[in-house]
Amino acid sequence: MPGSGAFYPARVVAVAFLSLLIGAQVIRSAAVADRQRHPSLAAMLWPGHPAMLTERSYLEVAGAAAKGREVGEPALADLRRLARRAPLSPDPFLIQAAIAETKGKSAAAEKLLVAARDRDPRSRGTRYLLADRYLRTWRVPEGLNEIRVLVGLHGKGGEAFLPMLATYAKTPGSVENLKPFFRKYPMLEQGVLGQLASDVANADLVLSLANPGVSNPRWLGLYAGTLAANGQFAKAYAAWAALGGAGRGKSGLFNPGFASSEAPPPFNWAYTQTPEGVAEPDGKGGLDVLYYGRADAPLALQLLILDPGNYRLSHGVAESSGDASELHWRLRCARPEKTLTDMPLRTAPTNIDFTVPAGCGAVWLELWGKAGDTPQTTGLTIRGMRLSGMGQ
């Protein structure tokens, strides 16, 4: 057809141009999406993309804050362009809030953060900054609400506020605000109480915030151990028994059969695994012990609350190899520090008599490996563990 040849090349050129344009768009979009790996390429291919404008603005604000200078006009121009190109984005408001903060205009910064939240209620960054702002200014209900939304959006996210919530928990009136919040977000409760539990001064506060319906919370071992380390054995044991749903039994020894238990140390067994040896329950009522004889090492221990008096620790030994006498039971007062007895094991049934003096607040029962002159491996199983009061 006449003219078809002229039309065909024109169409080919148009298609080729559009293909190149679309290809360039794809490449630029990919470069912007991958800007953390190729920042210079992204900036060169699409400098006006909202993501690039946002990144440049953030970097300029951070750089200005670090050097103590005003934000430059190019960054402010980027902000204006960003507001035009991404009218629903919270980023321009977040960046302006950052600029306001660098100028000490906290109230203005907060208004900008609220505007950013209004633009995008699902912006996790905005919620985080507002929660931080509210908690720092002691508007706790507002801060907790932002954390609530943040956790709801992401399934997590409140972990970053644990130190701040722990600090707030120490202030008068905090329990009334935090308890209902913690009941709705138990993982945050566990985290905050875990931070508080490491300081004996927070002992009463921890219990006032704790949910009594939660058995063996993950902070319980740390809490009881902290109190015990400070000589508050009765208080430590009372909390451990109440929240762990466990008791030491009539003899004072908990879990003599080395059964699987969620109850944490120190009033349950703690088993150590070191390069020097290992002790672990065999699942049949016994404790498998393997000790390499290279250096002294603790293998298993439990803190006992015992009244003053005479006691006997007894058990059998099975499947023994090596020298059983390199394994010792040591019993010592936790406070005041005093060794009550230190006796080696035998392959025959073991009976260890000891006396708890008055004033001994608690007793550590410890299984130790003690190295001899020549290293040798010792393995055995302890069965039939029993602690009884003499004459009882």
Image (cartoon, rainbow, N blue to C red):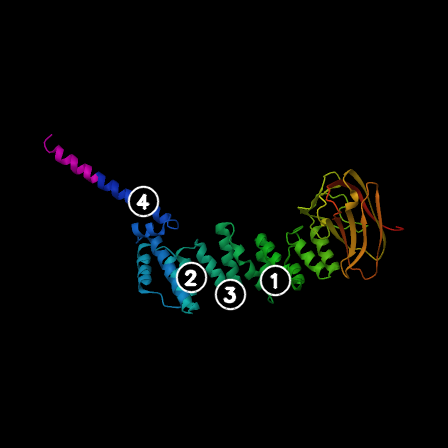
Q: Is residue 377 above or below residue 2?
A: below
Q: Which residues are magenta?
A: 1-14
Which badge, 3 or 1, comes first in the chain's sequence?
Answer: 3
- What residue would you read off at disc 3? 136
Left or right? Give the position of 106 relative to 160.
left
Residue 197: where, in percent of width, then height? 64, 59
Q: Residue furthest top?
A: 1
Identify the disc placed on residue 175.
Answer: 1
Left or right? Give the position of 233 relative to 389.
left
For the N terminus, which image quadrant? top left
Left or right? Give the position of 193 relative to 348.
left
Q: From the image, state whether disc 3 or disc 4 is nearer to you.
A: 4
Q: Residue furthest right?
A: 391
Q: Amino acid at mark 2?
A: Leu
Q: CA distance from mark 2 to mark 4?
A: 33 Å
Label 4: how many residues lie within 10 Å, few (<14), some (14-19) or many (20+)?
some
Residue contact at pointers 2 and 1, CB within 8 angstroms = no
- What residue would you read off at disc 2? 113
Which badge, 3 or 4, comes first in the chain's sequence?
Answer: 4
Question: Of 347 and 224, which appears nearest the observer?
Answer: 347
